[in-house]
Image (cartoon, rainbow, N blue to C red):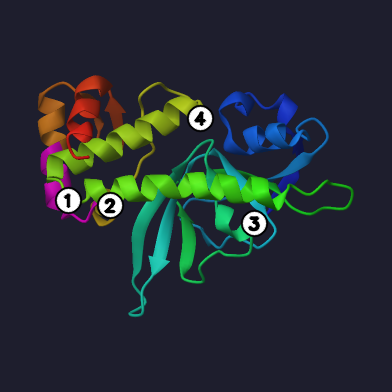
Amino acid sequence: MSETDGRRNCWLCPLRERCALAALLREAGVEGSVETEAVDHPAGSVFSAEEGWVCALRSGAVKVLWNEDDRRARVIDFRFAGEFVGLDASLGVEPARRSYMTVQWTRLCALRGAPGAPALPAGLLASRLAAAILPVYAHNRMMQAGARERVAAYLVRAYDALEQGGGWRPGLLPSVARGDIADYLGLRAESVSRALAQFRDAGWIGGKIDGIEVRCVDPLRELAASAR
């Protein structure tokens, strides 16, 4: 973990209704009595999830990396505001080869076994982890589709997370490099750029290279659904 910036109570957070960690504390009946730590990471920071921590993304975006034998780090997923980060670590099963890199300045809300803080039931954590695994299978099915369908699926995934996590500007996605999106989707960067250009010509997206703005999510959602 990086530097911490005091403690927070989920009751005071404007994202509490859309945050996975707040929902977990609420279900455990301890939302009002547990404080989380705010942990900040500058853009480009690499970190690992720590055993015993339960973390959710408060702001920013995070790449999930898998470190190959040849020292290459492959992008296997993304985490956006309101989503868990490193949930496996809370149960002590975080893969050693997995790490995380911030796409931009990022704040995590983290809960650990601090003195006086009630522990979250292992069964509740395990159920959340099982639910988090389900999108992996959807991603595997999507990877059999064409480039346009894959890129549309990524845009919808980021858009939905942004809407749930309360982005500061509706439809404006985190600035993720084309190469990272391509790595995640199993495509070449040129294929991602071509698909985005087609979506832009159709009026579905806008914005500049460093910030995609989703303007018409419904046709993207339909295209993404055709990949399943």
Mark 3 and 1 residues: CB-CB less than 8 Å, in contact? no
Mark 4 and 2 residues: CB-CB less than 8 Å, in contact? no
* Residue 219, percent from left and from top: 19, 23
Mark 4 and 3 residues: CB-CB less than 8 Å, in contact? no
Q: Which residue is mark 3?
A: 90
In the rendered image, which quarter contains the N terminus? bottom right
* Residue 199, percent from left and from top: 15, 30
Q: Which residue is mark 1?
A: 144
Q: Residue at x 40, y 65 (%)?
A: 66
Report how far apart the C-alphas of labels 2 and 3 lie in the structure. Answer: 25 Å
Magenta segment boundaries in residue numbering: 185-195
N-term mark: 4 or 2 = 2
Left or right: where 15 falls relative to 62: right
Amino acid at pointer 2: Asn
Amino acid at pointer 4: Gly
In the rendered image, which quarter contains the C terminus? top left
Q: Magenta includes 130?
A: no
Q: Nearer the viewer, residue 51 or 119?
A: 119
Element under disc 2: helix
Q: Residue at x 10, y 32 (%)?
A: 198
